[in-house]
């Protein structure tokens, strides 16, 4: 057993039982070890959850970085969509991510910011747009993952529309992009 195996198994447990049911006791049982042995790898459950959040974000963390010839609007939209897809890959992915502090490659984030600035977006606007898109995406996925619809014990009222989460996300993303473009005159 090593740290990577513990995180992989913890993510498997997350997908099976959901974030509320993930515990070090359940994880130890899944790994066929005594619970205290997990503390060799993670001092607290919070440390474990942080490692899980970082590992769950790996698909987005390895997505291609922008290149100088890219259109900033297309790149921004693709980057935000990649973030959404990654959050949706895991049960309760948005909840897991929402409580974490990014500890990943800050150089990647700096490259993204530098690209936006080089494309003509003022640095403060680029920072706020990235933050707004991130929070919007987490909130959208949080709502999507919470919307279990019929079968969750409650019937949907007849006058309540079924939400097309992807269309709602795309509409919100377009508002962010259009607002940034107008603000910067681009």
Image (cartoon, helix red, strand yellow):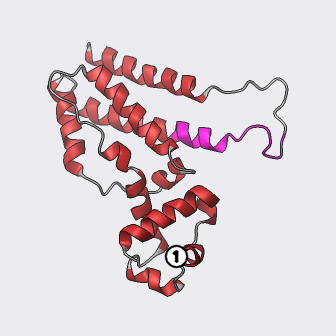
Q: Which residues are magenta?
A: 139-154
Q: Percent from the top left, x then y, of residue 79?
A: 34, 33
Q: Percent from the top left, x then y, of residue 151?
A: 80, 42
User: In this image, 26 relative to 149: left or right?
Assistant: left
Residue in front for this viewpoint, 92 or 183:
92
70 in the magenta segment: no
> To which quarter of the image does residue 74 belong?
top left
Q: Residue at x 38, y 77 (%)?
A: 41
Q: Residue at x 44, y 71 (%)?
A: 6
In the rendered image, the vertical position of residue 56 relative to residue 162, given as above or below: below
Residue in front for this viewpoint, 182 or 21:
21
Quadrant including the N terminus: bottom left
Residue in front for this viewpoint, 10 or 43:
10
In this rendering, the count of numbered labels is: 1
Q: Percent from the top left, x then y, of residue 83?
A: 41, 39
Q: Does residue 135 show up?
A: no
Q: Residue at x 39, y 50 (%)?
A: 57
Q: What element does badge 1 sit on?
A: helix
> To which quarter of the image does residue 13 belong?
bottom right
User: In this image, 161 relative to 5: left or right?
Assistant: right
User: In this image, 107 relative to 8: left or right?
Assistant: left
In the rendered image, the vertical position of residue 90 relative to residue 9, given as above or below: above
> To which quarter of the image does residue 17 belong?
bottom right
Q: Residue at x 74, y 24 (%)?
A: 161
| Residue on which disc 1 sits | 31
Quadrant including the C terminus: top left
Q: Does residue 183 show up?
A: yes
Q: Percent from the top left, x then y, of residue 75?
A: 29, 26
144 in the magenta segment: yes
Badge 1 crowding class, 10 Å Cα cut-off, few under 14, some 14 to 19, many 20 or more, is some
In the rendered image, the vertical position of residue 34 relative to residue 182, given as above or below: below
């Amino acid at each position: 057993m090593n740290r990577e195996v513990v995180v992989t198994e913890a993510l498997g447990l997350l997908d099976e039982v959901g974030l509320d049911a993930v515990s070090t006791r359940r994880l130890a049982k899944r790994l066929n070890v005594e619970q205290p042995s997990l503390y060799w790898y993670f001092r607290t459950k919070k440390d474990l959850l942080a490692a899980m959040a970082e590992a769950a974000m790996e698909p987005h963390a390895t997505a291609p970085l922008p290149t100088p010839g890219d259109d900033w609007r297309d790149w921004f939209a693709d980057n935000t969509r990649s973030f959404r897809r990654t959050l949706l890959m895991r049960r309760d992915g948005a909840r897991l991510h929402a409580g974490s502090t990014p500890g990943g490659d800050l150089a990647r984030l700096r490259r993204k910011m530098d690209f936006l600035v080089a494309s003509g977006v003022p640095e403060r606007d680029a920072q706020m747009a990235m933050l707004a898109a991130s929070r919007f995406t987490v909130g959208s996925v949080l709502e999507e993952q919470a919307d279990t619809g019929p079968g969750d014990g409650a019937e949907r009222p007849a006058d309540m529309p079924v939400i097309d989460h992807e269309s709602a996300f795309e509409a919100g993303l377009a508002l962010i992009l259009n607002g940034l473009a107008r603000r910067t005159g681009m």
